[in-house]
Image (cartoon, helix red, strand yellow):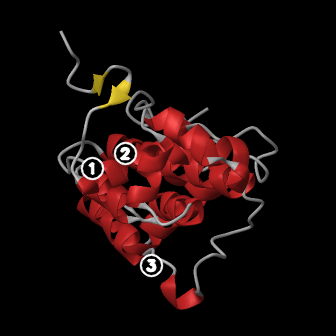
Amino acid sequence: MTSSATTGGRARPLPPEERRAALVEATLPLVVQHGTKVTTKQIAEAAGVAEGTIFRVFPDKETLVREAIATVLDPLPTVAALNGIDLDLPIRERMSQAVEILRKRLETAFAVMSALRMDGPQHHKPEERPSHQPMLEAMERLVEPDQDKFRLPAPEVARMLRLITFAGTHRIITDNHPLTTEEVVSVLLDGVLCRPETGDRASNPGESC
């Protein structure tokens, strides 16, 4: 029986927008491996299409590569994932899920930027760079239910969570020893100082030593 995904080793026909998205998805890991030296032949093989198919969707390889990079820098999928976290979960679990989502995005972005020898998204003009405000607002939403437990306002807690996750995920900043999700959350919620034994160590792992 013929697979719904392929026919004779080639990808099944897709509507133009789906084909575009599939090519972008196939291109991204190749950019991580090869940078801008990735070839259309490599992309076509990864996507399971004829090389000419690429040029029926994109005018040239450079446009396809730029679009693949743009998907990494687009914050909206990350915002949607953050907004999908259940606010009824305990704060530590909510933060852990948020850090996992952010780390996944950052690891991909750092890998792409490293492959392209970039220090940041220079291919965007400053006014074209995506705003981080929607992401910060989504993270603020996650911590607001526990505002009464913090000594800082919820927006500041959200900002610090994003900053610690960013720094703790970057392999150069961390000397190739990135922080785990649990470490990021614990540093923010518990700090690093020992505290007197409280008898509630199980529910507050950073409360005592």
Q: Percent from the top left, x then y, of residue 3?
A: 23, 18
Q: Name the residue type under label 2.
A: Ala
Q: Percent from the top left, x then y, of residue 160?
A: 53, 65
Q: Marks 1/2: CA distance?
A: 6 Å
Q: Percent from the top left, x then y, of residue 200?
A: 40, 32
The number of numbered badges drawn on the structure is: 3
Q: Percent from the top left, x then y, of residue 182?
A: 52, 37
> Would you name the residue on which mark 1 appears?
18
* Disc 3: CA contacts within 10 A as few (<14), some (14-19) or many (>=20): few
Per the rendering, the mark at residue 38 is none
Q: Marks 3/2: CA distance?
A: 26 Å
Per the rendering, the mark at residue 22 is 2
Asked if residue 192 shows in the view, the reply is no
Q: Would residue 192 appear left or right of 165 to someone viewing this image?
A: right
Q: Quadrant of the N terminus?
A: top left
> Would you name the residue on which mark 3 appears?
131
Mark 1 and mark 2 residues within 8 Å of each other at the beta carbon: yes
Q: Name the residue type under label 3.
A: Ser
Query: Which is nearer the eye, 106 or 166?
Result: 106
In the depicted structure, whether residue 193 falls above or below residue 157: above
Asked if residue 33 shows in the view, the reply is yes
